[in-house]
Image: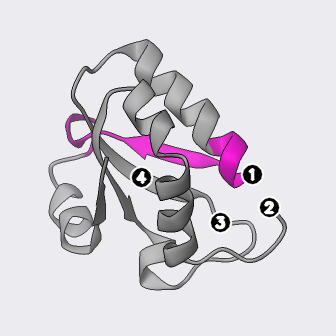
Amino acid sequence: MNKDLSSNDIFEILQTNQYLLKKYSVRKIGLFGSFIRKEETKKSDIDFLVDFEEKSFDNFINLVFELEKIFNRKVDLLTEKGISPYMLPYINNEVRWYEA
């Protein structure tokens, strides 16, 4: 993927690859960070907050690998439990959810 990405592009790609979300038991996945704030650069990573139906290390790690492959960028994948309680309100204020 060589063109510049926007948040809308990211959601379209998630829609196209929805089978991956089902494969790794994703209930919903949210985009936050620079892409939501429209501050991204060509080198920006993509920040996702994920809620799993069935949470496991394999689902988490394999989803990261798959997302990095389809977006051709580094992906930061977080769960609510993995976020500092001080940062969570800021992330929750800007996250845009995609329901799998």
Q: Residue at x 68, y 47 (%)?
A: 70
Please tell me whether residue 4 is drawn above or below residue 51 in the rendered image: below
Mark sitting earlier along the chain (4/2) = 2
28 on left or right of 2: left
Residue lying at the far bottom in this picture: please name it: 38
Q: Which residues are magenta?
A: 68-83
Type of amino acid under label 2: Met
The image position of residue 81, as x and y in percent, is 20, 35
Q: Answer whether labels 3 and 4 touch (C-beta < 8 Å).
A: no
- Sort mark 3 into few (<14), some (14-19) or many (20+) by Cα contacts within 10 Å: some
Q: Which mark is nearer the camera, 2 or 1? A: 2
Q: Which residue is mark 2?
A: 1
Residue carrying label 4: 48
**Secondary element at image label 1:** loop
Which residue matches tag 3?
44
Judging by the rendered image, the residue that carries numbered circle 1 is 72
> Spatial distance from mark 4 to mark 2, Cα to Cα?
19 Å
Identify which amino acid the numbered label 3 is placed on: Ser
Residue 96, image quadrant: bottom left
Measured in 3D between alpha carbons, the distance from the residue under mark 2 to the one under mark 1, in whole angstroms, is: 6 Å
Indicate the amino acid at tag 4: Phe
N-terminal label among 1 and 3: 3
Residue placed at 32% from the left, 27% from the top? 25
